[in-house]
Image (cartoon, grey):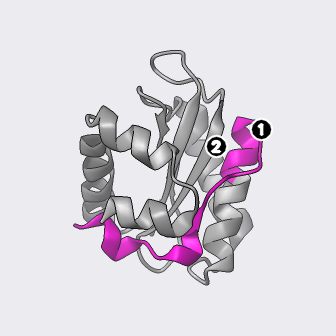
Amino acid sequence: MALMALLDESAVKVPLLAKDKAGIIRELVDLLSASGKVNDSEALLRAVLERESLGSTGLENGIAVPHGKTDAVKDVCLAVGVAPEGVDFDSADGKPSRLFFLLAAPKGKAGPHIAALSEIARLAHSASLIGALVRAKDSAELLDLLR
């Protein structure tokens, strides 16, 4: 699964305005909702927060991948945002997260959900790409870099 197939500019925000974990998740959920990909933003928010309560989705190298499964979405969808100053996301390396991929999937579509998570995890191994994405001036530049 190509991440770009899940993403369009309406679901990308540079910079994110929130300054804490809950705010970042809310902002990304609202972004997906505004893009028309979510039937019930509150249900998606609950699903992501429930998943986050099981263990932080803050990875290493400044990336966080909050995600959830809910019937509030019909298909796997993705929102991406950058918080250049960083936000404490209880990450695995203890450092602030700056690049956020919020992934939502219907409860019955585990395969595409896992494939997207795997692709994001592969991105996490490229420090130069992560650095470029975090320095993106706007959504269009971030999308160009991901392509």
* Number of marks: 2
Marks 1 and 2, the one that precedes in the sequence:
1
Q: Residue 19 got which mark?
A: 1
Residue 2 among those drawn in magenta: yes
The image quarter containing residue 13 is: bottom right
Amino acid beneath label 1 = Lys
Start and end of the magenta stretch?
A: 1-25
Amino acid beneath label 2 = Ala
In depth, the one of 40 and 137 nearer the eye is 137
In depth, the one of 68 and 132 nearer the eye is 132
Q: Position of residue 70 (x, y in %)?
A: 53, 65
Above/below status of 99 relative to 109:
above
Residue under label 2? 83
Q: Residue at x 41, y 70 (%)?
A: 76
| Residue, far top | 94
The image quarter containing residue 85 is: top right
In-image side of 131 versus 97 (left or right)? left
Are the residues flagged by discs 1 and 2 in contact, CB closer than 8 Å?
yes
Which secondary structure lies at badge 2? Answer: strand
Q: Residue at x 56, y 70 (%)?
A: 11
Which quarter of the rendered picture does the C terminus lie within? bottom left
Which secondary structure lies at badge 1? Answer: loop
Above/below status of 138 relative to 36:
above
Q: Is residue 33 visible?
A: yes
